[in-house]
């Protein structure tokens, strides 16, 4: 990722955020986990799942490379929510009879960790927010992999 030379540059670069570049770097790198279900979905022929996770991967990387409250954040949040909702719909409705027993706890932790992270961010506990949001990335990846692996 980019190298920031001074504290002044950090202040100017992240003026609209309340945490520093180390926090966003962790989330930028954990966003790369989205490539796993994208490639696995393409390999298994789950093209719509691969498309939604791939688009979410791109919007997430685009946002976390330089996080600011702009249109990039809005697109990332909406695409991520759409992908989670479509993943749940696809798994429960389309493949409901073959749901992996670990899918529900994995996706539930993804859905629950997101508002917990927002709560921690608002309380200025930024490292806990980063851990919670990385948990969202990990549990969403696991849940999507479980969903794809059980397709007929």
Image (tube, rainbow, N blue to C red):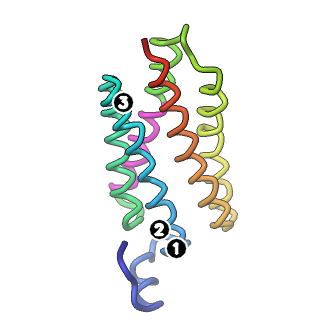
For marks 3 and 2 on the same chain, the one whose residue lies earlier in the sequence = 2
Residue displayed at 38% across by 33% down: 40
Q: Is residue 84 above or below residue 31?
A: above
What is the number of the mark on residue 41?
3
Give the Cα separation between the discs numbered 2 and 1: 5 Å
Question: Residue 152, located in which quarter of the rendered image?
Answer: top left
Which residue does the numbered mark 2 point to in the structure image?
25
**Category of crowding for the residue at label 3, using alpha-carbon neighbours closer than 10 angstroms: few (below 14), some (14–19), many (at least 20):** many
For marks 3 and 1 on the same chain, the one whose residue lies earlier in the sequence = 1
Image x and y of residue 45, in percent: 31, 23
Residue displayed at 47% across by 24% down: 149
Image x and y of residue 113, in percent: 64, 45
Between 73 and 91, the residue placed more toward the observer is 91
Give the Cα separation between the discs numbered 3 and 2: 27 Å
Most frequent secondary structure within the magenta stretch: helix
What is the number of the mark on residue 108?
none
Which residue does the numbered mark 1 point to in the structure image?
22
Label 3 element class = helix
Give the Cα separation between the discs numbered 3 and 1: 31 Å
The label nearer to you, 3 versus 1, is: 3
- Determine whether label 3 and label 2 are within 8 Å by CB: no
Which of the image's four quarters has the N terminus? Answer: bottom left
Residue displayed at 59% across by 60% down: 130
């Amino acid at each position: 990722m980019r190298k920031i030379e001074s504290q002044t540059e950090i202040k100017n670069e992240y003026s609209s955020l309340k945490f520093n570049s180390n926090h966003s770097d962790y989330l930028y790198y954990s966003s790369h986990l989205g490539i796993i279900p994208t490639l696995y979905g393409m390999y298994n022929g789950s093209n719509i799942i691969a498309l939604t996770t791939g688009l979410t991967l791109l919007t997430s990387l685009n946002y976390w490379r330089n996080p600011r409250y702009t249109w990039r954040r809005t697109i990332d949040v909406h695409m991520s929510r759409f992908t989670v909702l479509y993943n749940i719909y696809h798994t429960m409705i389309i493949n409901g009879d073959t749901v992996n027993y670990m899918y529900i706890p994995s996706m539930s932790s993804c859905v629950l960790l997101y508002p917990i992270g927002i709560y921690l961010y608002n309380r200025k506990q930024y490292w806990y927010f980063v851990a919670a949001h990385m948990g969202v990335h990990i549990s969403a990846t696991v849940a999507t992999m479980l969903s794809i692996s059980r397709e007929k």
